[in-house]
Amino acid sequence: MKKITLYFLTALFLLALTSFNAHKFYMGIYQVNYAPEKKMLQITTRIFVDDLNKALEKKYKKATHLGTVKETNEDVVLMQKYLAEKFRIKVNGTAVTMNYLSKELESDVVICYLNVRGISKIKSLETYNAVLLDWDSEQQNITHFTGFGDKESFLFTESATNHVLKL
């Protein structure tokens, strides 16, 4: 039943992304996929760009313009710095560094692509996700984990920012 509800919420979120310019709920979607043949974690983030700009401005006391013609390299660097602080992963109890690959804008959502190389065996995967929680306490971040057997999803909120997946 949980999975059906989770899929329904994800579908509703994606529908909202394509139907409306403004949004009244605060949700980010994250995908963490383990590709054992590549010894790699592949990570995709989907975050409302206006919320991200507001969070960056609040944290760094500087207006950013991600997703606009005014976007600067400094804006992207601040976004990378923010994501590195607010979204972290430990593999087998050891913190790993995520490599930022690229980003793209889809409607009003910024999609970031990251990876972690050199992961040969995973016994546990600990994820910390507090992206945008410092900006709005109503923010929720759903994270889907694939490549570890059954697909698992977890909802990160202000009161639940850590999740450990034991394999």
Image (cartoon, rainbow, N blue to C red):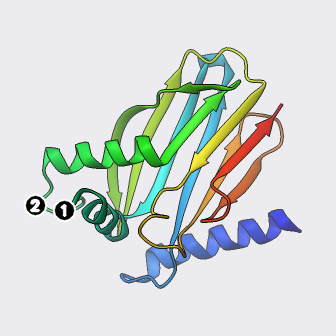
- When the figure is inspected, residue 104 is found, relative to residue 167, above or below; the finding is below
Residue 38 numbered tag: none
Q: Which residue lies furthest to the right in this view?
A: 1
Name the one closer to the observer, 10 or 153. 153
Q: Earlier in the sequence, mark 2 or mark 1?
A: 1
Left of 44 or right of it: where is 154? right
Q: Where is residue 111 in the image (x, y as percent from the top left)?
A: 41, 53
Residue, x 42% and y 83% (percent of image)?
20
Instruction: Check disc 1 and give the amino acid type.
Output: His
Residue, x 36% and y 81% (percent of image)?
21
Name the one closer to the observer, 58 or 23. 58
Residue, x 44% and y 82% (percent of image)?
23
Name the one closer to the observer, 129 or 108. 129
Disc 2 crowd rating (10 Å Cα; few below 14, some 14-19, many 20+) is: few
Instruction: Check disc 2 and give the amino acid type.
Output: Lys
What residue did someone put label 2 on?
70
Q: Position of residue 29 (x, y in %)?
A: 55, 58
Q: How many labels does the image show?
A: 2
The quadrant the C terminus occupies is: top right
What residue did someone put label 1 on?
65
Q: Where is residue 127 in the image (x, y as percent from the top left)?
A: 63, 42
